[in-house]
Image: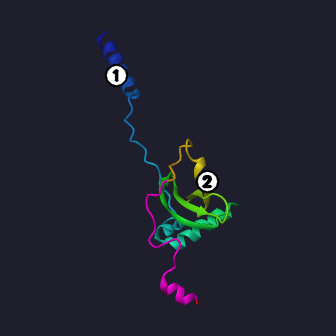
Amino acid sequence: MRSKLLIGMTASIALAACNESQPQQPQRPIKVRGPEQDALHKLGALDLAIALKRAIYDAGYTCKRITDGGFVGEWKNLDMWMAHCVYDTGQPRDWAIFTGPDGSAQIRDCKDIPGTGLPECKIQKRPSGSFTELKTAERKNAK
């Protein structure tokens, strides 16, 4: 009888141990970055304005002139940029430009961002230089 009791206890302990699992480590998201994303961070204001304006036009929107812009932050695997566009007629418009690791860009009007869970269109880091003035050396070379 003792041996049956001992076998029964051993079996129940073994079964109980099977249900115990090791605590899982929190999963860290995989961060994917592309060279185009990194290159945008190295641009001065005028070159950044050209890149952002091209992304806006490629998406089918317009932007006469960018007078302000910069890096907003990261959202998932995308870098978020903002461009303040002014037009000859009409109201200025703020655009959110999301750049992906594959070189793609997605454009959203900043007025449509609140309530979507996307970051607020607030520039955290501006590029060096001016969006509206060329350097004196660049003006001389252009003539």
Magenta span contains residue 139? yes
The quarter of the image holding the C terminus is bottom right
Q: Residues within 10 Å of mark 2 (few under 14, many from 20)?
A: some
Helix, strand or loop at mark 1: helix
x and y percentages locating residue 51 in the rendered image: 58, 69
**What amino acid type is highlighted by mark number 2?**
Arg
Q: Main secondary structure of the magenta part?
A: loop
Is label 2 in a helix, a strand or a loop?
strand
Residue located farthest toward the front when viewing the structure as drawn: 89
Decide which of tag 1 and tag 2 comes sooner along the chain. Answer: 1
Task: Tell me where residue 45 appears, x and y as whole percent.
Answer: 50, 71
Residue ID for mark 2: 108
Numbered circle sitting on residue 57: none
Residue found at x 53% / y 73%: 132
Q: Residue at x 64, y 64 (%)?
A: 87
Residue 140 vertical placement versus 118 (above, below)? below
Q: Which residues are magenta?
A: 122-142
Q: Find residue 13 and name its label.
A: 1
Q: How is the image coloured?
A: rainbow
Is 57 situated left or right of 83 in this image?
Answer: right
Instruction: Report whether 60 appears left or right of 7.
Output: right
Q: Quadrant of residue 107?
A: bottom right
Asked which quadrant contains residue 15, the reply is top left
Query: From the viewer's perspective, is 61 left or right of 122?
Result: right
Q: Residues within 10 Å of mark 1 (few under 14, many from 20)?
A: few
Height in image: 15 above or below 125?
A: above
